[in-house]
Image: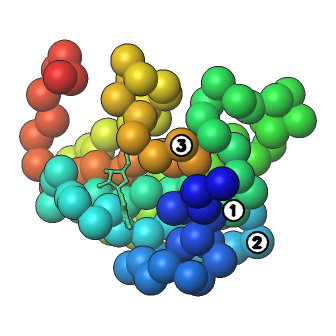
Amino acid sequence: MTPCLFCEICAGNIPSAEVFSDDQVLAFRDIDPQAPTHILVIPRRHIASLAELAPADTELLGHLLMTATGIAEGEGLAGAGYRVVVNCGRHGGQAVDHLHVHVLGGRQMAWPPG
Ligand code: AMP
Ligand code: ZN
């Protein structure tokens, strides 16, 4: 089985530019930033995508989002605003099959997204 890239980052086997860490989640800078600030927040436990979440994960999902908003605040994005994105599956443009929340800010975002 191919090891999961983000599980490897959680385990410390692949380096990342860490922004925040606790026992449930890890946040690190995206390697290919699409905005001046681009951070990924992931659960430490492997969950492939939003589509794989179970009711028991409700609290974890809340924690992921609260971590994302806390990071946005800490990065000075809250005043001007920012975007939080979760891509899910092929049509959603998900490339890494380990749930992750994108926090993007520092520039004006467009709508609709591509
Ligand atoms: P998605 O398209 O939603 O699956 O997003 C995957 C994100 O992971 C992309 O924005 C990539 O640039 C990012 N990414 C891939 N490999 C790494 C890595 N080793 N460290 C940090 N970010 C990564
Ligand atoms: Zn994983």
Percent x, y of residue 100: 51, 47
Marking on residue 23 = 2
Mark carried by residue 44: 1
Query: Residue 26, percent across and down?
Result: 58, 67
Q: Which x, y percent locates residue 90?
A: 41, 23
Q: Residue at x 54, y 72 (%)?
A: 9
Rendering colour mode: rainbow
Tag 3 secondary structure? loop
Give coordinates of residue 110: x percent, y percent.
Answer: 12, 28
Crowding at dot 1, Cα within 10 Å, few <14 / some 14-19 / many 20+, comes out as many
From the viewer's perspective, is 24 left or right of 72?
right
Q: Quadrant of residue 55?
A: top right
CA–CA distance between discs 2 and 3?
A: 21 Å
Toward the front, the furthest residue is: 1
Q: Say whether disc 1 or disc 2 marks the residue closer to the N-terminus.
A: 2
Whether tag 3 and tag 1 are in contact, CB under 8 A, the answer is no
Compared with 88, 83 (above or below) is: below
Earlier-in-chain disc, 3 versus 1: 1
Element class at badge 1? loop
Label 2: few (<14), some (14–19) or many (≥20) C-alpha neighbours in 10 Å: few
Give the number of the mark in front: 3 or 1.
Answer: 3
